[in-house]
Amino acid sequence: MNSPDTKQQFPARFLSLLAGLTMLTSTVIAQPVPISTDIPEEIDLTADLTYATYGDRMLMADLYRPSGNSESLPAIVMVRGGGWAVGDKEGYGPIAAALALKGFVTASIEYRVSDEATFPAAVHDTKAAVRWLRSNAEEFNINPDAIGVIGGSAGAHLAAYLGVTAGIEELEGEGGHGDASSGVQAVVALAAPSSLLPVGGCNQSSDDPENAVVKFLGEGCSANDSLWAYASPVTHVSADSAPILMIHSEADTVVNFTESLLLGMAYGEHNVPASIHLIPDAPHAFWNFNEWLQDTIDKAADFFHHELQ
């Protein structure tokens, strides 16, 4: 997940992108405070709804909605991180609830992890979640033409991938509701790995069976570098890609912030709306801490309201 020093290597190509880039103010936090896991009373939560079925395997989603709101609202799929290997839908509950308070119906989903099924299984799952929401729009009282997606880290990779691969049949999967579209109208990607191929080509790390990407894809880079490229969001950006907002820490030591710059550059080449907000001195998973959660929610909500109106 490493990237080149993009600002030095591609200065001319980044001029237009950097002109629209926003820096979020912050201070160095020695010990950031984890966000509360409590769900506000103003939120109605419906847990463990089956959104996709693969034989005997059922995938669940938790639905969050502002209490007392009977309007048809935009919907947002929440995709958790965890290296495509760990985590649960409840972990993104506080973020789902915070966005729901901003006027959305949010669906925090589980998906098949890498030791259960390799790529493109998790992609199939995110697309199935969108189709499920769209197919049940009347029941959930949502606008089927206004569905977005947000994810963090590995979840941001899947969210971005969802936004750039609409209409690719082999990536749809058979999770259900196949007559509905899996296309989304907006993407928010928090610390997204946009290019899985290592800088400078395949190496010992990218062939290590314990590497998270190797586990996710099922093959090392040297064995199948074309798969690593195909699984990278940056490879699929086109004029049909969904508008995207990327938020990333400049101090991220897990996924370098230049990953977002590379994806933004690809969007710019196709004249598709893309915004990047860089946060100084924040940890990789900044959205899990009080110091950065509200700014993240405010930025994401403003973006979704603009794109999903």
Image (cartoon, rainbow, N blue to C red):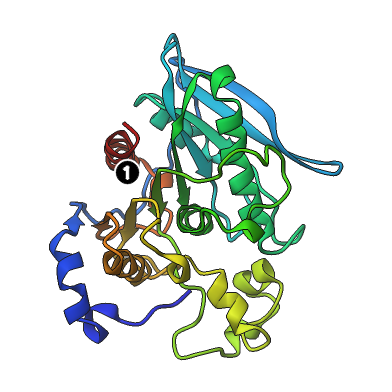
Image quadrant for the C terminus?
top left
**For residue 111, side relative to residue 106 (left or right):** right
Q: Quadrant of residue 66?
A: top left
Residue in view at x 44 percent, y 77 percent:
2
Residue in view at x 27 percent, y 42 percent:
299
Label 1 amino acid? Thr
Please, is residue 23 above or below residue 209 in the view?
above
Q: Residue 22: x percent and y percent?
A: 18, 55
Q: Quadrant of residue 170?
A: bottom right
- Front-most of residues 290 and 131: 131
Please, is residue 134 above or below residue 184 in the view?
above
- Front-most of residues 297 and 225: 225
**For residue 205, side relative to residue 26 (left or right):** right
Q: Residue 193: x percent and y percent?
A: 46, 66
Residue in view at x 46 percent, y 15 percent:
41
**For residue 153, side relative to residue 296 (left or right):** right
Residue 16 visible to the viewer: yes
Residue 88 visible to the viewer: no
**For residue 127, side relative to residue 194 (left or right):** right
Q: Secondary structure at mark 1?
A: helix
**Residue lying at the far right of the rendered structure:** 56
Q: Residue 183: x percent and y percent?
A: 50, 46
Q: Residue 77: x percent and y percent?
A: 51, 39
Q: Quadrant of residue 238?
A: bottom left
Report the residue marked by disc 1.
Answer: 296
Q: Residues within 10 Å of mark 1 (few under 14, many from 20)?
A: many
- Front-most of residues 285 and 54: 54
